[in-house]
């Protein structure tokens, strides 16, 4: 390989990356009192060291790795910012054997302590072999991928002997900053992990409903994640509840509810009970009841839709059966008229009005969830024109369908299309009607959960939903 090309390949900060201009202050999430941060502040702000989507040049000012691999103990990227930085994911390939934190720090011009914190947060992944580049990858990135995955190169890699290429491309979290990387190892670095500032505002002990030998039941606050995000496993219900209870072994997730919803979640103390509870959920032996605050009344009875089998938001549902789509069913047990949340309560809980005008009344629906698909209740209620209050992802689509019912290609008034291309365009148009995932609370609570285990009945209820709390009580939470 020519020397210049080898240099470029060794310092290239990503194999493939849709360019995203990073913000100028990467260090804002680090403690301002950090001596290491102060030491590198000039380097981070230097015009000679831009953090762009282009390859890092050898002439750029870089952050030198410390002489020792022992980094200061620093458990959080604090203070936690109230707003997330724009997503920034970098893809790297090590060109020689090296320590992970040193390689990432030098390649991306980041302080070693910041990189160590990203690893602590679970924001760094590795694979023995780089994955296939996406269709939009630049030709240079495709060339480097082919170069590092040449059979003649792979056959000399000790770490992948006996593995297929597919097995070697499986990604794992980097858990140790001092992980030794073999030349050719692929890294994915989430430079700006998704943050959950609400975690630091909660009295977690007060949210615990029950503690047993096998599990803990938590009244999950809204705007928090049960088990964490792809790039942030620290700011989660399992971590903060484990700490609040002083548990030596961290709790484990058994099921999920949306970040924007609140209510009952069961966290396991043991791997055995975690496996048992997963089995009970699969066999539909766990009963879940929800309360949903909707914009209009919903008739009692079973509501059935079919959900598109694509694992990304928004979740599209159809009233008609479509081959391969997943059946979604929920039973409306009761629906009663309640006051629309006051402006003060909406302000306290940071409820997004989504452009929906304030009404005199809302409607509280008691729901028996018969199937448990992601976003199921939210998507189904929006599909029948009764979206959940504050649900910015689905309420905007419901409003669009109220104005123009035929815009939903899977709705009752969907049009007939002359070609697959025409229908595909209609689906994309319908997807664009949906908004972003809520960052705060919506009118949805996992109000009750129950199951039978070892001859005993276990049943738990969440507290008063946010829309029923008076403003003074809400302000104290």
Image (cartoon, rainbow, N blue to C red):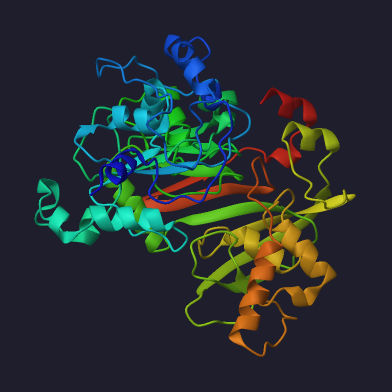
Q: Residue 423: x and y, percent? A: 64, 81
Query: How many labels were placed on the picture?
Result: 0
- Give 14 or 378, whichever is nearer the viewer: 14
The quarter holding residue 121 reads: top left
Report the quarter where the C terminus lies.
top right
Residue 348 position within the rendered picture, expressed as x and y whole percent measured from the top left: 75, 31
* 388 relative to 329 in the view: left or right: right
Q: Position of residue 268 (x, y in %)?
A: 36, 41
Question: Is residue 323 placed above or below 259 in the rendered structure?
Answer: below
Where 143 sits versus 448, above or below?
below
Residue 407 locus on image (x, y percent): 75, 74
Residue 467 lies left or right of residue 223; in this view the side is right
Residue in view at x 74 percent, y 41 percent: 351
Q: Look at 47% across and 35% down and name the residue there.
A: 236
Q: 469 left or right of 25?
A: right
Residue found at x 38% / y 53%: 141
Residue farthest along the bottom direction in this orientation: 418
Residue 383 versus residue 217: which sits nearer the camera? 383
The residue closer to the viewer here, 210 or 328, is 328
Q: Nearer the viewer, residue 326 or 364?
A: 326
Tell me if residue 159 can be seen. Answer: yes
Q: Splitting the image into 4 quarters, where does residue 164 fall?
A: bottom left
At 41% from the left and 31% from the top, the residue drawn is 118
Whether residue 461 can be seen here: no
């Amino acid at each position: 390989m020519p020397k210049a090309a080898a240099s470029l390949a060794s310092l290239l900060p990503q194999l493939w990356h849709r360019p995203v201009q990073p913000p100028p202050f990467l260090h804002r999430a680090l403690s301002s009192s950090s001596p290491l941060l102060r030491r590198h502040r000039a380097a981070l702000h230097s015009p000679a060291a831009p953090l762009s989507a282009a390859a890092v040049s050898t002439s750029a000012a870089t952050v030198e790795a410390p002489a020792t691999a022992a980094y200061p103990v620093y458990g959080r990227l604090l203070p936690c910012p109230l707003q997330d930085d724009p997503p920034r994911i970098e893809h790297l390939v090590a060109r020689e054997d090296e320590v992970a934190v040193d390689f990432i720090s030098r390649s991306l011009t980041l302080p070693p302590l910041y990189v160590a914190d990203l690893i602590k947060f679970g924001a760094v992944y590795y694979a023995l072999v780089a994955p296939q580049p996406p269709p939009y990858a630049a030709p240079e990135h495709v060339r480097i991928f082919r170069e590092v995955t040449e059979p003649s190169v792979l056959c000399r890699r000790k770490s992948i002997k006996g593995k297929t290429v597919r097995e070697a491309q499986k990604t794992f979290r980097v858990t140790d900053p001092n992980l030794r990387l073999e030349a050719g190892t692929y890294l994915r670095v989430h430079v700006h992990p998704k943050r959950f500032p609400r975690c630091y505002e909660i009295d977690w002990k007060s949210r615990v409903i029950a503690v047993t030998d096998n599990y803990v039941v938590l009244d999950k606050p809204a705007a928090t994640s049960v088990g964490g995000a792809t790039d942030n496993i620290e700011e989660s219900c399992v971590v903060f509840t484990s700490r609040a209870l002083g548990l030596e072994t961290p709790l484990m997730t058994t099921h999920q509810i949306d970040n924007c919803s609140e209510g009952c979640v069961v966290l396991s103390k043991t791997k055995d009970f975690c496996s048992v509870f997963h089995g009970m959920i699969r066999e539909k032996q766990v009963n879940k009841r929800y309360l949903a605050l909707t914009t209009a009344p919903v008739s009692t009875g079973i509501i059935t839709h079919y959900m598109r089998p694509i694992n990304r938001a928004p979740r599209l549902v159809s009233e008609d059966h479509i081959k391969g789509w997943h059946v979604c069913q929920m039973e409306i047990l009761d629906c009663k008229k309640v006051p629309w949340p006051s402006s003060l309560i909406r302000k306290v809980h940071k409820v997004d009005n989504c452009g929906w005008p304030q009404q005199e009344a809302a409607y509280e629906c008691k729901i028996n969830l018969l199937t448990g698909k992601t976003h199921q209740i939210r998507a189904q209620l929006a599909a029948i024109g009764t979206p959940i209050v504050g649900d910015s992802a689905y309420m905007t689509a419901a409003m669009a369908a109220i104005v123009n019912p035929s815009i939903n290609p899977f709705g009752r008034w969907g049009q007939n299309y002359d070609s697959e291309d025409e229908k595909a365009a209609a689906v994309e148009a319908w997807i664009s009607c949906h908004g972003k995932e809520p960052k705060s609370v919506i009118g949805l609570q996992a109000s009750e959960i129950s199951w039978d285990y070892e001859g005993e009945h276990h049943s738990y209820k969440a507290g008063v939903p946010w829309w029923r709390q008076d403003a003074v009580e809400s302000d104290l939470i």
